[in-house]
């Protein structure tokens, strides 16, 4: 059962909004990991020293990593004004706001147990809002994967990039030691 599944079952002790935001952030972290994985596959020299490279002005942070990967792809450009990039950018702003939070002082008088003040993540406070957003992250990851495999030639079918983004055998293995 995933956090979003649990959020949908929302019993009295379950905060669907909290689990939804947690799922959104987990999805974003998985996307970041996937970008680093792709970078290691198609630009290992850059990713060998990625902290230094992606701390500069031209390509900075996860946004810079996505932009850099697209700079390596021929015949396709990063369309920042459309989906799935727009959702990626929105989730990144939420992630940054939560990770580098600043104190916001707010007061409200209400009899409600749940005040109605607006947060930056209100647009993602339920599973039905988070699922499409996570699918947009997956779509961007898949677009990047498709372009990345065009750069792999001889070992394409042995690369984990052979599998669709967030699918396949990664981290899903079993084995037995033979001490014969």
Image (cartoon, rainbow, N blue to C red):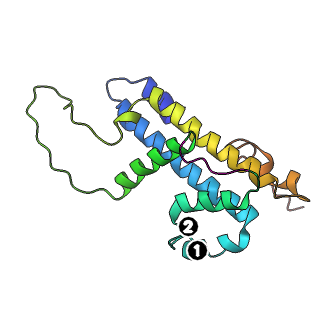
| Magenta stretch, residue numbers | 76-81
Q: Nearer the viewer, mark 2 or mark 1?
A: 2
Q: Position of residue 118 (x, y in %)?
A: 26, 37
Circle number at residue 59: 2
Q: Is residue 175 visible?
A: no
Circle number at residue 53: 1
The residue that appears at 74% across and 42% down in the rendered structure is: 164
Residue 85 in the image: above or below residue 135: below
The reply to whether the magenta stretch includes residue 77 is yes
Q: Position of residue 39 (x, y in %)?
A: 68, 62
Q: Which is more toward the observer, 142 or 179?
A: 142
The reply to whether the magenta stretch includes residue 103 is no
Q: Which is more toward the observer, 174 or 18?
A: 18
Q: Residue 137, located in which quarter of the rendered image? A: top right
Circle number at residue 39: none
The residue that appears at 70% across and 57% down in the rendered structure is: 38
Left/right placement of residue 156 relative to residue 120 reads: right
Left/right placement of residue 94 relative to residue 26 reads: left
In contact (CB < 8 Å): disc 2 and disc 1: yes
Q: Main secondary structure of the magenta part?
A: loop
Left/right placement of residue 3 relative to residue 123 reads: right
Q: CA distance from mark 2 to mark 1?
A: 7 Å
């Amino acid at each position: 059962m995933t956090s979003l599944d649990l959020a949908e079952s929302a019993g009295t002790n379950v905060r669907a909004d909290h689990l939804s935001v947690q799922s959104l952030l987990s999805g974003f972290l998985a996307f970041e990991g996937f970008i680093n994985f792709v970078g290691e596959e198609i630009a290992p020299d850059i990713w060998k020293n990625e902290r230094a490279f992606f701390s500069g002005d031209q390509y900075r942070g996860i946004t810079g990593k996505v932009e850099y990967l697209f700079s390596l792809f021929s015949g396709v450009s990063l369309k920042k004004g459309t989906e799935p990039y727009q959702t990626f950018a929105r989730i990144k702003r939420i992630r940054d706001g939560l990770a580098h939070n600043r104190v916001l002082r707010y007061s409200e008088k209400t009899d409600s147990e749940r005040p109605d003040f607006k947060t930056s993540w209100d647009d993602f406070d339920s599973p039905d809002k988070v699922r499409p957003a996570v699918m947009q992250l997956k779509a961007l990851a898949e677009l990047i994967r498709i372009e990345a495999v065009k750069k792999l030639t001889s070992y394409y079918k042995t690369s984990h990039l052979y599998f669709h983004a967030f699918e396949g055998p990664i981290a899903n293995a079993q084995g037995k030691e033979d001490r014969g």
